[in-house]
Structures are given as C-alpha cells and as structure tokens.
Amino acid sequence: MEAVQIIHARIATETEVIENGSVLIDKGRITAIKREASEITGETINIDGEGKLLIPGMIDVHIHGANGYDMMDGTTRSIQEVSITSAATGCTSFLATSVTSDLETLLRMIDKVKEVVGHEEGALIAGIHAEGPYLNVKRKGMQNEAYLRHPDLSEMGLIIDRADSLLKMVTIAPELPGGMELVSFLYKKGIVVAIAHSDATYEEAKEAFRLGASHITHCFNGMRPIHHRDPGLIVAAMEEQKVTLQAIVDNVHLHPAIVRLMHRVKGPDGIVLVTDALQAMGLGDGEYVFGGHQVTVRNGIAQLKDGTLASSTVTMNEALRNAVELGIPLQDAVRMASTTPADVLGLTNKGRIAEGADADLVLLDDQFEVEWTMIGGKMIFNRT
C-alpha cells in the first residue's frame, strides 16, 4: 500500500482544529499530523482536502438498516447494504443492531453478520448490538411485544456462544425479574450493558450501574421520564460519570434544549451520537415493515399507526450537522460521533486523528455532506 498525504485540510484532532494541515498515512495508519500543507514528492500520493473538514471516521453503535434493507432480514446482502450506505454517510465502523425477535431469527442474524465480517464492502462491522429481547413491555416503543421476555441467562449464554465474541453491546431493562443477574453476567463477559425500554426507578438504575451497566440506549426515549419526585433512570445515569448516553439528534427524538442539556451535564466524553436508523435511511418517505410492524415514514419521521416513533432515518453526517446547528461546539460534536463511541467499544485505534491510529477518515464540505470516506487508508467512498 502506497503512502498517502492529505493536504490543505481543516483537521479535527482530539485537542484542536488545525485550519490548514496535512495528515500522512502509511500502511493504513496515520504516521504524522502536520500544521503545514506542503506536498510530498516521490511515491507518496497527495490528496487535496481543499480546505474542507477532515474528521475521524464516525462510529454508529446503533443502526438497524439502510437503503431498503433490514439487518434482521436474514441475508448477507442486507448487512452489506448497511455497510455501503454507512460509509457513504461518513460512518466507518458500526454495530449491527437487532430488534426484539424470536431466538431463531436473532441467531440467523448473528450468523449472517459473522459471514460478512472481514468482507465488508463499506464500513467495518465492529460487532453486534442486541437491542432486546429482555425489555419492559411498559416502555416497549416499537419493539414487538409478542417477543418480549424476561432475562434468561441460559438463552443469553447461547447467544454469546453463537456470536463468537462479536456481541459487544446488549440493551436490557434491568428491573425485570433476573435483570440484575443478567447485568452482572454480561459485565463479567466484557459486554457493554446498555439500558433502555425500561421502567427502572432511580434506585433500580443505580443498582444496575453498580453491577456494571454503563450505557443508555437512545436516552430519554423508551424509558421512565424524569419527575421531580421520581427522577428515574435518566437522572441516575446523568449522575454517574462512567455512564454514557446515546443521542438521536434528528430534531425529532430529542428537543434541541435536551441535546444541549445532555451535553452540558455529560460533556462530549459522555454522549454518543447514533442513528438508530431503520431501512428507510437513504430512501426516505414510504411504507416499510420493521420489527414486525407496519411503519410509515413521512417527512423523514418513522412512526407506527398509533404515532409511536419507530427508529429514525437520520444519517451520521446529518446527526453531526444537527448537533453543531443546535449549538454543540464542532470539536465536541466530532468527539460524540467518533471518539466517544470508539472509547465505549474499546477501539483505541479508531475514532481519532492521531499518530498510530487507523486511517479511518472522512472529508466533509461546509454543509457536512460527505466528499469521501477512507478506511484503513483506502478510499471506500468518493462522491465525485
């Protein structure tokens, strides 16, 4: 692999934004970051950033589908389409995310993800996120009630064995019978324990955090709301430094003031931008079947017949742009989209522009549209 230098770029590092710098890449890794933009002659390929924003590849820890494909379809093609669409929207790694289903369907999804790993046509699969099936029917949202059930350590053991270390995150409702035991079980396995679709009280949430839960899926959505005499899960999470919060910044799931509040309380190291996208991402309005439900997408908003929100259609580059437009500083928003999710997953070589890091990079124009996406120093998507 030839050495590559990106010149004349506005570079978002972990500590600053370099207005006109260069990034040198060799053998798929970043070897130097320079404050000047001079070309290197010889065998090095120079790529002109044209003064546009260069950010670390974004990482989506919560995505269900894209471009008309649902990763629960049971085909490798559906997973590859999510990989391709993710790369085109500035996402370089993602967690293939399930919805609540019967065990057979979940295991089939896991098998297909395993087939694709190492052969991705776009963004890399960083693992699997199982959203359910151990969720509270009271806060089910769009999750299919027919498949919701109480935590089962034996069943979860089977799922973990089938996933072959690919299971990186599990979203549960810890207040359910057996929930706290499952939190402890997953934590000891090194799996990120996330909470959502939960009616957990403040005290129950605190116990779950004590046992190892450390992440909140689509914060504020699908959980007990804040009340001044019943603070619930959200306030408990905001008090815990180790707990990170997912934010769907699509101007639908969260009011702008809530996004700013989350940022003020937790900071960029405590918030993870996600899409929570269904297969409508990249296609837009229409009728879809998702999680066993009929879903209507109108004006980009996905809903069930009763008006319940059913995931989102936002992309990672749109979420980043929205966060900045809502008042989140650019550097913080980039951390929320790239560095913090990498840290949550323990991906120390991803999510940052730094010497030694993987050359997973995205060039954005002034409207946050993706010019190109690079993974491991290789151009995966180029708009031109």
Image (cartoon, helix red, strand yellow):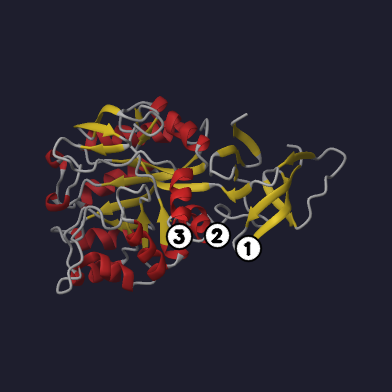
Reading the chain from its start, which is encountered first: label 1 or label 2? 1
Which residue type does callout 3 highlight?
Gly
Amino acid type shown at disc 2 = Gln
- Which residue is more in the foreground, 12 or 252? 252
Earlier sequence position, callout 1 versus callout 3: 1
Tell me if mark 2 has few (under 14), some (14-19) or many (20+) residues whose alpha carbon lies within 10 angstroms of its own: some
Q: Position of residue 75 (x, y in %)?
A: 36, 26
Give the side of residue 317 with respect to residue 198, left or right.
right
Q: Nearer the viewer, residue 34 or 167?
A: 34
Residue pictured at 48% horizontal, 55% vertical: 324
The image quadrant of residue 307 is: top left
Q: State yes or no: discs 1 and 2 in contact (Cβ < 8 Å).
A: yes
Mark 1–mark 3 contact, CB under 8 Å?
no
User: What element does badge 3 sit on?
Assistant: loop
- Figure disc tally: 3
Report which residue position mark 3 lands on.
327
Under mark 1, the amino acid is: Glu
Nearer the viewer's eye, disc 1 or disc 3? Answer: 3
Residue at figure coordinates x 69%, y 56% from the top left? 19
In the picture, the disc for residue 355 is: none
**Mark 3 Cα within 10 Å, few/some/many (few <14, many 20+)?**
some
Pinpoint residue 53: horizontal percent, then vertical percent.
Answer: 62, 48
Q: Quadrant of residue 376?
A: top right
Tell me residue 102's x, y (percent): 20, 37
Instruction: Determine the secondary structure under disc 2.
Output: helix
The residue where tag 1 is placed is 16
Asked if residue 82 is positioned above or below residue 199 in the image, the reply reads above
Left or right, residue 352 beside residue 245: right
Kindly identify which numbered label has been placed on residue 331: 2
